[in-house]
Image (cartoon, rainbow, N blue to C red):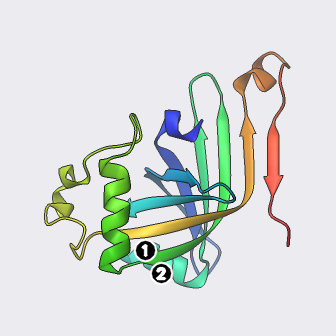
Amino acid sequence: MAHSIVWASVATVDENGRPRTRILHPIWEWDGTDLFGWIATVPSPVKKAHLAVHPEMAVSYWTTTHDTCTAECQVEWYHDDETRAAVWNKFAHGPAPVGYDPSIIPMWADGPTSHQFAALRLDPYRLRVMPGTVMTKGEGDALRWRARP
């Protein structure tokens, strides 16, 4: 569902617990054992400050049919060239509609080693997927998963 919706509302919180939302474009991977995501992003002062004190994000997707999915995640920054290049390539060679050419972002014209390009790794600890029919017709089920403590 996330890869068909593509754009997500993402929330972080500051040192005082105040939330901030933004729209971001995660790409998700299943390695056969674990689900994790990547976000290509500008390492803005707000994101850096929030994630320094609370390294977590809530990622929420919604469609006009009211299909929703949410991932609550631990988050880790990656600034090394190898990881940034790998994440760049995940988006550049990703399947439609989630794949795109990151160089279309003016701040990333210098490629994955630009100081304005960073990668965030998302490690979900709670997932919820709900078809819109659960709400609109009372049909189907919401799926929930939580990592073991």
| Residue at horizontal 72 percent and vertical 40 percent from the top | 129
What amino acid does circle 2 point to? Ala
The image shows residue 107, relative to residue 129, as above or below, that is below
On the image, the x and y values in percent for residue 79 come to: 36, 79
For residue 108, side relative to residue 94 (left or right): left
On residue 27, the disc is none
Q: Could you tell me which quadrant the C terminus lies in?
A: bottom right
On the image, the x and y values in percent for residue 132 come to: 71, 25
Return the residue at label 1.
46
Q: Quadrant of residue 110?
A: bottom left
At numbered mark 1, what does the secondary structure look like: helix, strand or loop?
A: helix
Return the residue at label 2.
49
For residue 93, side relative to residue 6 (left or right): left
What amino acid does circle 1 point to? Val
Near mark 2 (Cα within 10 A), the count class, few <14, some 14-19 or many ≥20, is: some
On the image, the x and y values in percent for residue 128 come to: 75, 46
Q: Could you tell me which quadrant the N terminus lies in?
A: top right
